[in-house]
Image (tube, rainbow, N blue to C red):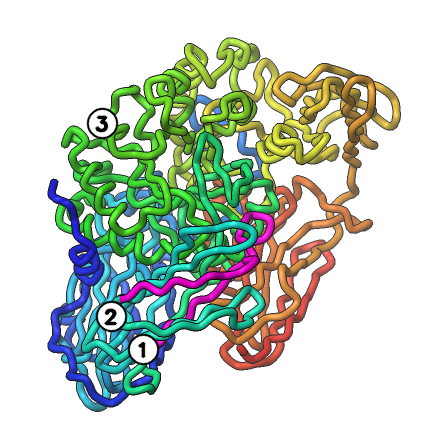
Amino acid sequence: MPGISRRRALQLAAGATVAAKLPAAGPVVPRRETSFDEGWLFARGEVAGGELPGLDDDGWRRLDLPHDWGIEDLPYAISDDGAVTADASVLTTQIPPAQPAPPAVIGPFDPAASTGGGSTGYTVGGIGWYRKHFDNPGSRVELRFDGVYQNADVWLNGVHLGFHPFGYTPFAFDVTPHLVSGTNVVAVRVDNSGQTSRWYSGSGIYRHTWLTVTGATRIPLSGLTVTTPVVTERRATVRVEIDLDGPPPDLVRVTLRDPWNHPVARREAAPGTPIDFSVDRPALWDTGHPHLYTAHAELLHHGRPGDATETTFGIRELTWDGQLRLNGRPVQVVGGCIHHDNGPMGAVALGRSEERRVELLQAAGFTALRTAHDPPSTALLDACDRLGMLVMDEFVDMWDTGKTPQDYSVHFAQWWERDLTSMIRRDRNHPSVVIWSLGNEITDNTGGVRGAQMAQLLRTLDATRPITLGGGSTFTADDPSWSYVDIGDVHYNANGKGYAQMHAAHPDKPMTHSEGFPATIHQDAVFVDANPWAVGTWIWAAMDYLGESGIGKTLMAPAGTAASIGDQSVMPGWSIARLLHHGWGGFGYPYPYFQGNCGDLDLIGQRKPQNHWRAAVTGVSPVELLVERPVEPGTEQVAVWWGYYDELESWTWNVPDGHPMVARVYTPGDHVRLLLDGEPVAEGVPERCAVALTAGYRPGELTAIASRQGREIGRRTLRTTGPAAAIRLVPDTRKLTTSRDDLAHVLVTIVDAHGRLVPDAVHRVEFAVRGAGTLAAVGNGNPHNADSFRRPRRHTWHGRALAILRPAKTPGVVTLTASAPGLRPSEISLPVRAKD
């Protein structure tokens, strides 16, 4: 394929923008970029003439963006019986039970109407229309959408501006030629009909929208690029390049500010000229010290500033030489895959939702995320930049050959250049992004031609990071992808074959393992530690997500089943585990399961058992103690593939005294003792940083003591709690602002009379909100508790639930009250202050 020029790449980036006659050079107009999120109208379903400016839309629903109609209650969902599916157990039988029967329709769930079925969590897509009336802001105007899922058609005053099929990349239109004086009407038709995704995508304008006003000459979308070609502790070179759209200015001026907002350098240059800065003793960006600089660029016309924009960036040296190194120092990659949804919020991408997710995953021990399998929101990457989380930034789940009938493959051949260009241009200034992935588990029927085309284009847009293909090296060492990737990548230990053989055939290239099972955390980590060319493993998944329902099922199988599998990270155990997993209710598990249930964290961000194992394997914790939920006689819990054990940090169980309970202790130590009320009851030697010990139940204190070479390295105690007595509310913030990106995530906990979590409590909690805010969503981590995310009540799971508050647009105080029959209620109040 002929080389793709930089000019061609820039043209592709603007591919979604309507061709328009640009205004001639005129008065200098400072840039005004404002949120376009407020004051939209919405109608679910097809609307004849929905694009016409004169349409009577008085009866349409009023809302602010971002918006995802897929997570909202269906208009005909009248059931309020979430209790039917609120049982705390996630133990599954080989033949799914017929009783109790879940509600046929509840909240957003309707298995009969969901074309995506279990893949999309039994939610309903379809068609939705959005309209907004607004005044002409004047001068040159661009309308931008950060993300619409999917197949978006946009009109302004009845004129069709364009079509954008891909649900995860931004797109923009120059609306200047189509604006009229007075009121204007923009209309957007979103079509998420059919089987469009293998997981929950959401439906609608689920990311932010913007209106940008400039003069005739502007810096286009993603037109400011910063690289750091030379980085040392003493000095760094920062290179800034500025793209222009319109008649050229006289000069461009760039100012650099350090992480403390102090100006460190300023230079002017002719348009089209890269500008280099020398920064002495730079504050380097790394995972422990994520220092961010700012580059502010402005256009000068006869000495007067015109259009201006800025971007943050990090000064850091990135090398892959078997290990991933930042600024010459190796980085331990503890990776996790994430989808784009935010649990109870659905696909809605608000800044605080994305930031909280990164905070939670960082606290859970992760150092790197893979944005499976599409470009993330800008807010998520911004949070990764600020917090020091590394990112594998992935493009798509399919190329020309689809995985579902109506997915992006339908449009891929015509749109991949524009969308890949858009993604790379948008994301290349983010220091958290350390590797690009062209796709996930791709079926490429072109013999490697398509992948080579994509890699060639990408390298014209960014040559500072390596390229991989998610799972591209899984099957053979001679896969065509090896010819165009910089780093080989496998999934699930090359499907049990091991990937040392892959590297032996390509010893000059490092390898990543971008999907691994929760059931093989230890084996995967040991392999990476033993092979310096193996950069890291990304678990599937770091956090639970909607869709791929029940793939993380916990098997309650005949006793002895686990021993018959052997090591499921390699053959033949890998294949035996596959047959067992897929034969247990299907690939996933039927409704009411609606989420993957395979994350280290559950849907509301609480730790799950596999994260405790991870903490021991990585050396973060000297000892963790969990207890299995009791099983039926003659059976045992079995963790296979994406599934893990149903166990809790609990010594509060509704079983007779003396009932044998399996306590699992996770530790990097070499010996474990188990005490009940101070008396020894069991001991054992951990294998793969875990040991299962049996103790007869009686209320009291269960303690695990871990040692290494005869010396205690840690202990953990579980105490029997009293009955549920009260509700405790703990917000993740003590104050809110009127920003529409702000949220308060309030953890709801059921406690006993002494304020201790009642670990397995299931209670229906009612919520009431008054004052300067609303209840944005509610939820819990239960993978089969199909219920509304919008109604002001929710059952707890493992004694916890989550209520999400969104502040009002005016200052004040927002108050949340939580109550449940027989429990002492709780109330919190948070100030809502004016946004800075």
Q: Amino acid at mark 3?
A: Pro
Q: Are marks 1 and 2 in contact (CB under 8 Å)?
A: yes
* Disc 1 crowd, CA 10 A, few/some/many (<14, 14-19, 20+): many
798 part of magenta stretch: no
- For the question of whether residue 84 can be seen, the reply is no
The residue indicated by pointer 2 is 244
Highlighted magenta segment, given as a residue range: 273-298
Seen from the viewer's position, the closer of residues 541 and 244 is 244
Label 1: which secondary element: strand
Q: Amino acid at mark 2?
A: Leu
Residue 709 left/right relative to 189? right
Q: In terms of secondary structure, where does tag 3 sit?
A: helix
- 135 vs 290: above or below: below
Q: Which residue is mark 1?
A: 299
Label drawn at residue 476? none
Spot occupied by residue 15 in the image (x, y as percentages of width and height): 17, 60
Q: Nearer the viewer, residue 173 or 489?
A: 489
Residue 187 position within the rendered picture, expressed as x and y whole percent measured from the top left:
22, 72
The circle on residue 480 is: 3
Quarter-wise, where is residue 492 in the image? top left
Residue drawn at the location 19% of the way across and 67% of the way down: 154
Can I make out residue 480 in this image? yes
